[in-house]
Amino acid sequence: MITPVCRLAALCVLGAVLTACGADTSAPALRPRAARPSPSASPAPSRPPTLAPGPAGLTPVFENGPRTLGRTVALTFDADMTADQGPRAAAGEHFDNPGLISALRELKVPATVFMTGRWAEEYPDQARSIGRDPRFEIANHSYSHYAFTDDCYGLPTVSEDRMRADVERAYKAFRKAGVVDAMPYFRFPGGCYDRRALRAVGGTGVTAVQWDVVSGDAFATDADAVARQVLDGVGPGSVVVMHCTRSAAPTTERAVRTIVPELRRRGYRFVKVSELIGAAGGRR
């Protein structure tokens, strides 16, 4: 028969053994549970890629993606409207091109639209629709579409001390129209720039985007000629410049309906400018 004294001795021996083995005989501590992410929480969106500033903080300039990227091409469309063209729009002139945007959607083609702030003011519903469509991205083409250099296709000019403000005013017009995620890319009106202009807009953090294929669609009347010019010029990583204005580029939609299937037949994949900049080593 095990007496109470023997039972107590046995318990003492067991405790000594556990202590000698390093066992913790104290009451277990309560450990806090790992925090779980809120079901409604979503990861912060990544920033669009941009190129590093050039020497002395000059705005970097991008013309095309890496030629080693394979058969990729970015179609870009300038939605031009100059600050003083409001009376012409009121009189019935069309600076928009909803048929072109519909064609791009129908053909499932991603694209980058370089939009002026004045265009967004005139067509806020279209600007918002384009900006909310994941197939497209909106970039900055200035507010006024006035030239940032002298002697640029007869365009009025912006003074150097107003260049940065003109770029920033375009972004404000986009936000007012409901475009909240316009890209940090800027296309100089007419594609005209010099060192002075690159320095003036350097503080905005944008990458200037040019092109390596000119479509020739501005004021063109022959859609087949526009299509041939693009098809003859495209190479891996190309950026094609076209327009999104019926009044100044009436054949663009028809040209696109020829260009897209032919480039796909040749094995090309359509991308947005942001993908090409990212492939070129753009930082986020």
Image (cartoon, rainbow, N blue to C red):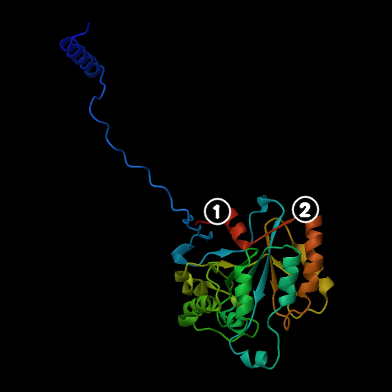
The residue sitting at 47% across, 79% down in the picture is 165
Image quadrant assignment for residue 9: top left
Would residue 105 be found to the left or right of residue 43 on screen? right
Would residue 202 be found to the left or right of residue 134 on screen? left
The residue sitting at 31% across, 38% down in the picture is 31
- Front one among 137 and 49: 137
Alpha-carbon distance for marks 2 and 1?
Answer: 24 Å
Label 2 or label 1, whichever lies nearer to me, is 2
Along the polypeptide, which appears first: circle 2 or circle 1? 2
Residue annotated with mark 2: 267
Residue 49 coordinates in the image, percent (x, y): 53, 59
Would residue 260 be found to the left or right of residue 61 on screen? right
Going by the numbered disc 1, the residue's amino acid type is Gly
Q: Is disc 2 placed on a helix, strand or loop? A: loop
- Compared with 184, 249 (above or below) is below
Residue 180 coordinates in the image, percent (x, y): 52, 70
User: Taking the image as drawn, is residue 227 in sight?
Assistant: yes
Disc 2 packing (10 Å; few <14; some 14–19; many ≥20)? few
Q: Is disc 1 placed on a helix, strand or loop? A: loop
- Front one among 266 and 107: 107
Disc marking residue 281: 1
Going by the numbered disc 2, the residue's amino acid type is Gly
Disc marking residue 139: none
- Compared with 222, 88 (above or below) is below
